[in-house]
Amino acid sequence: MKLSEIDKYYRGLMQIDELVRTDVSMNGIQVSAGNGNADECEIGKIAFAVDACMESFERAADQAADMLFVHHGLFWGKPEQVSGAHFRRLKFLIEHNISLYAAHLPLDIHPEFGNNAGMCESLGITDPEPFGEYHGFKIGFKGRLPEACSISHILDKLGLSADRALSVLPFGPEEIRTVALVSGGGQNEVYQAMDEDVDLYITGDSSHQIYHPCLENRINLISGGHYHTETWGVRLLSEKTAADLNIETVFIDVPTGL
């Protein structure tokens, strides 16, 4: 299958073009391997990973992948000198004939196979509503759990524990019924969760500055790690791509612990 055909498939599947002015990520094809022509670049196997880093590239090459799909690409809305690690990354992709494709916000917000949709599914939230206003788009979801449960039960459902999560602030109701989620760097959206009176807010990153607002507004918070909360989308999209395009896919797990 040609790279240009895969690009067309993903643009039809996700809001890549709609988010071009909102997302600092250069979503879509970032590196076209071969002779640089996406119409001639043949793709027989796609690897999926969270980050465009050398370890992901090397493992994609070990898997004989022709393309790597990532959530965090190499280009973020500003010119960058092609030197140092940036040079070595591009050089590796070109020398190993691996194309690079990125989808940042389009993968966060997708209602079926996005990061937040994946977490909602794991928690049994069947009718999630868009949540988390960001430059005119709702980038997360909120919803009601099938039955009230504890934070430890939710951590278990997400493949986490009190020790593995970056932080857990148990400041809200012990019996949790409503949840809001924004994967990755969504700590600022906790204030929207407070305004909407949810019992628990789940994100990837958090910092000192939200501790007292969470305490005083009596809301629970799970910071599950930027990496961990953004593995859901690439895993789900890997499965969907394989089914829709009849192409071999593989997920490459490169956890950072952050």
Image (cartoon, grey):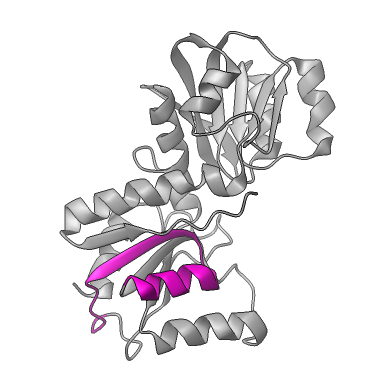
Q: Residue at x 33, y 50 (%)?
A: 237
The quadrant where residue 113 appears = top left
Q: Residue at x 65, y 9 (%)?
A: 173
Question: Picture coordinates of residue 185 (x, y %)?
Answer: 64, 46
Locate residue 134 relative to residue 246 in the image: left or right: right
Question: Picture coordinates of residue 37 (x, y %)?
Answer: 31, 86
Q: Residue at x 38, y 29 (%)?
A: 121
The quadrant where residue 223 appears = top right
Locate residue 150 relative to residue 166 in the image: left or right: left
The quadrant where residue 181 appears = top right
Residue 59: in magenta span: yes
Instruction: Work out whether residue 54 or residue 129 is closer to the camera in this orientation and state it.
Output: 54
Please give the range of residues in magenta.
39-63
Q: Residue furthest left?
A: 246
Residue 108: in magenta span: no
> What number of labels is visible?
0
Locate residue 258 relative to residue 214 in the image: left or right: left
Question: Picture coordinates of residue 98 (x, y %)?
Answer: 37, 78
Instruction: Work out whether residue 244 or residue 19 is closer to the camera in this orientation and state it.
Output: 244
Q: Residue at x 40, y 52 (%)?
A: 234
Instruction: Work out whether residue 229 or residue 194 is closer to the camera in this orientation and state it.
Output: 229
Locate residue 207 relative to residue 195 in the image: left or right: right
Give the quarter of the figure containing the N terminus: bottom left
- Quick check: 210 above or below 19? above
